[in-house]
Image (spheres, rainbow, N blue to C red):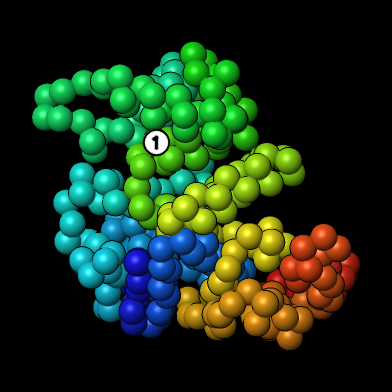
Amino acid sequence: MIAAEGLCAGYGGRTVLHGVDLAAASGELVGVLGPNGAGKTTLLLCLAGVLRPQAGSVRLDGDEMWRLAPHERARRVAVVPQSAEPAQGLRLLSLVLMGRMARLPLLGGYGPEDYRVALAAMQAAGVAHLAARPADELSGGERQRALFARALCQETPVLLLDEASAGLDAAARIRMHDLLAARCRAGLTAVAVLHDLNLAALYCSRLVFLKNGRVAHQGLTADVFRRDILMEIYETDVDIVAHPRTGAPQALFAPGAASPAA
């Protein structure tokens, strides 16, 4: 399990998160939602152990995240960022293999198992046919799938995703989340920051709504994906309907109903 308790964090003396509590257990896909500037990426940086809390804690199976050595964190938690600019000329295969670095022996190079895992991750992410292409020449969506493959290549028990599917077309988004959901059913713990509310409602077992750096609501998707809550969080009118195939709640926003920007 990965959990934040009473988490306060920020940058340069400015506090962004205020007393955030969140927990994700084995097999869960937890969605983190909220408007721009709510603190979602800051929360993920803390969960990854990259940003040290100002107060409170982030623990992974009882271990304080920011106290873990970088190679130990990389063995236990993988991150898919919003985007990344790979080095010029770096092949996609080399980019994905970077996910194996924490598992390499001292002074050792990649072995057959590393290449096997990388190929399997690329196939799962739908980019195996691009293995020899320079990553900086790929489209934004292809590059994002490569970053997803790199995270899968780490073979960690916890996966954190920061708008990982934002640059993908509709079918690619579904494929990514189908794969993510399957991995969670097999025991993976995943926390995903999402702006696509309907995608979150389709795939996440629980949702955490952030607003102004605080947890406004959290709970089972069926309990918190409600009209009153969405209107409170996003300050616009919305209707909730049931997905015709799954029954999951889906949001329909009303054009022209949003409050003017401050």
Q: In the rendering, at what x and y percent does residue 163 appear?
A: 56, 52
Residue that badge 1 annotates: 153
Residue 219 as seen in the image, left or right of residue 77: right
At a point 42% along the width and 75% down the height, the residue shown is 22
User: Is residue 165 depicted above or below 60 in this figure?
Assistant: above
Toward which corner of the image does residue 96 lie, by quadrant? top left
Pointer 1: residues within 10 angstroms few (<14), some, or many (20+)?
many
Which element carries disc 1, helix, strand or loop?
A: helix
From the top left corner, tell me how far across and down residue 191 is, in percent: 47, 61
| View extreme (top): residue | 132
**Image height of 46 relative to 223, above or below:** above
Label 1 is placed on what type of residue?
A: Cys
Q: Residue at x 77, y 76 (%)?
A: 236
Q: Can residue 42 be seen in this view?
A: no
Front-most of 155 and 43? Answer: 155
Q: Does 1 sit left or right of 85 as displayed?
A: left
- Which quadrant is the C terminus positioned in? bottom right
